[in-house]
Image (tube, grey):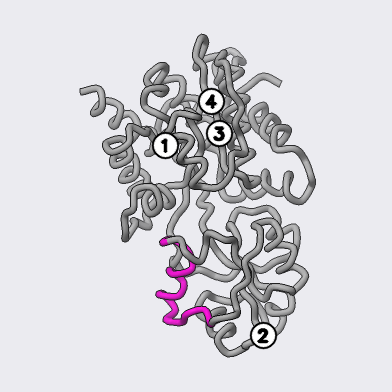
Amino acid sequence: MAVAGASAMVLAACGGSSDSGDSSSSGSEGGSTVTDTYRLDGINVAVGSKDFDEQLILGQMMVQSFGAAGATVDDKVNLGGTAVARSALESGEIDVYMEYNGTGWTVHLGQEDPSFDSVELTNGVAEMDLEKNNIIWIGRSPFNNTYGFASSPAATEANGGPFTLQTMMEYVRDNPDAVVCMESEFPDRPDGLILTEEATGISLPDGQAKILDTGVIYTETANSNCTFGEVFTTDGRIPALGLALVEDPGVNIVYNVSATIRKEKFDEAPESFQGIVDAILAPLSNEKMAQLNAEVSADGQEPSVVAKNYLVEQGIIAG
């Protein structure tokens, strides 16, 4: 009964129709904040995140909003990559971090053929992760930070404009000097390079892949040292560096974000955790998330500052 009830609550949150979503856009009655309404007094919560800008911002949003709601927060933001963050959650080193529905389905749950409908995918992940691992998925962002590619200025000019995934792979196949720069996980992930290779019918030729750190890919592609670079589509460095996104007809699976939290912790204050997370995620469109990311990656602001400004702007915490 308890599990079924929690599952129903999570699925309702994934639909994005909770009352807390309304409060995030207008503050709350009487000028109070979201965290005045949803309290976490007396609760200890360890908040983690992965190690790239978007995750640092989202992690700080939880650290600051949970703290404003009265929780004692252990800030463990910036743990490392996907495997590190998930392992920390499963072991109890952290209680919550933001995760992507596509990653949950393919990597953590080992499933194939994910839905390309964001609601359906999140609901499926939430049901299975709760049943198998006692992990609850709260909320669902409007933004979809999927994998993609950006072309260098030189390649874009040579092509006369943006590439599609098909024309990108044909260009790489036909130009032995072309280099595709990727982060270390991408070539071997089930939701990574293989999807583009299968969709286009072209395998990346031997010797034309280059593995770089995530941040370096953007600058090296902007400098035309990488012909194409693997990117996250909401990364603020794409517009800041004048990169051109390769057009994706729907090959890469969706990556909306939710808070993943241990059920034991969620049950200490289910309405408050759900209400605060819904308020954080509801306004985050692709454009808004890219803007926040750019404030860190392009403008050099601290993730904690960008997170605080957003939380105050949305009426989640007091200024």
Q: Which mark is in front, 1 or 3? A: 3
What residue is rendered at 23% in x and 28% in y? Answer: 4
Check the image and report above or below for 261 versus 237.
above
Amino acid on which disc 4 is placed: Ala
Instruction: Check if residue 123 falls in the magenta segment.
Output: no
Mark 1: secondary structure = loop
Q: Nearer the viewer, mark 1 or mark 4?
A: 4
Question: Badge 4 is on which residue?
Answer: 46
Determine whether the residue tagged by mark 2 lies in a helix, strand or loop. Answer: loop
Q: CA distance from mark 3 to mark 2?
A: 41 Å
Relative to residue 39, is residue 243 drawn left or right? Answer: right
Neighbourhood count class around disc 2 (C-alpha, 10 Å): few under 14, some 14–19, many 20 upward: few
Q: Tell me, for residue 177, which label it has, or none.
A: 2
Q: Quadrant of residue 5?
A: top left
Whichever of labels 1 and 2 marks the residue nearer the N terminus, that label is: 1
How many marks overall?
Answer: 4
Q: Residues within 10 Å of mark 3 (few under 14, many from 20)?
A: many
The image position of residue 34, as x and y in percent, is 55, 21
Residue segment shown in magenta: 190-205
Q: Are marks 1 and 4 in contact (CB under 8 Å)?
A: no
The residue tagged 3 is 48
